[in-house]
Amino acid sequence: MTDYKESKEEMELNELFEGKSTSSISKLVKRAKRRTILRNIVISILVIFFLSVTLGFTWLSIMRWSQENAMRDIQLFSRITNPNVEELGAQNEGNGLFEGILTFNRYKEIEGIPVNWSDRVVTYSLFGGVSRLTGDHSPIQIQDKNDGEMKFYDRVTKQRMMKFYHPDVEYPKLSDDLASLNNVADDTLVELALSFDQKYSPQEVRELMPEGITLKWYWVDTYSKTDIERLNDNTVEAVNGGEFQTEASPELATEIYGFDEMPEDPENPSLSEQMFLGDVEMGVSLEDGKYHGEFERIYKQLKGDSSTLNAKNIHVIGAVVTGEASDLAKLNNMPMIRATVLGVTANPNE
């Protein structure tokens, strides 16, 4: 009897290993195999899901970090550039896999009236870079048929862009748009760029401005001796190796640095200057910022040989003012004003 049981067990084992067994042991083994396969599949799915979620959150975090840095850099730099241009803040136009798009809505303010200005659109990358959209961003240029002077216009709004003349640069001709205000209605709201005959302190500019004229922005002298020599040197190398002379050109509003005039504070009359210096110092401290190199150049130029950077280091060579055309006529024949260029205009009744 014992031999029979042993023989039967041996047969079942043989059938099991040969895959022919239909016994309960075979069914258990097959069931265990299925469970193992299912468990491995479930574990694989969970691992893939966990990795996908982790990578997704990591990607979102990096893109968010890149977006915040891009907004920080653009907004900080805008505070010392783009005269009399206000920003409503950034709108995220959506993220691609490796880059996103930010749109900064902008306008100009003239005596309480907002005037539309072109938006600024930039891209930021997963790896921290910030750049403008590819393409041509140059302003519209039209030669005036009366005086032959080149006028610049915003690409979107078609409003006039301001130009500025450095006091240490010799130009073949200086703009005098102030005289043209005689041809517009007295209540027309006007933005006007002023270029001075020399360097002034911000407080001197405030004191010299006539009543009824709103000071909006100060053009700060951030030019080195090398910059002035370059602007005065009109020799240009030709493609064929020769040289030819060109005329010195004024600086466009997009090429200069300065700061807004803040609301008057009797307890802190130099608040505007202090905020400007604070922005420059912040730009220098952000070593990973897009404009760190330019902030550092401006800081060194302003500081000069001084031990510290303070409001006394600020020299103003131009300004942006607004007011009614009739009020701006008070600027006529002021010795400090070397040139005037018309900016945007607005009808107060519209």
Image: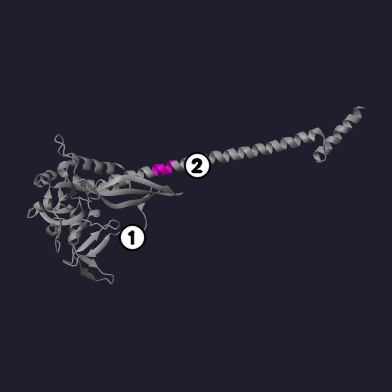
List x then y, in percent, for residue 270. Answer: 16, 39
Q: Which residue is mark 1?
A: 136
Q: Residue at x 31, y 51 (%)?
A: 119
Q: Is residue 9 visible?
A: yes
Whether the residues at callouts 1 and 2 have beta carbons within 8 Å, the answer is no
Between marks 1 and 2 in the image, the one whose residue lies nearer the viewer = 1
* Quarter of the image where one finds residue 164: bottom left
Q: Nearer the viewer, residue 62 or 186?
A: 186
List x then y, in percent, for residue 88. Answer: 30, 45
Range of residues picked out in magenta: 61-66
Distance from label 1 to label 2 (Cα)? 37 Å
Q: Is residue 39 left or right of residue 204?
A: right
Q: Is residue 35 left or right of residue 338?
A: right
The tag on residue 109 is none
Q: Earlier in the sequence, mark 1 or mark 2?
A: 2
Q: Nearer the viewer, residue 197 or 138?
A: 138
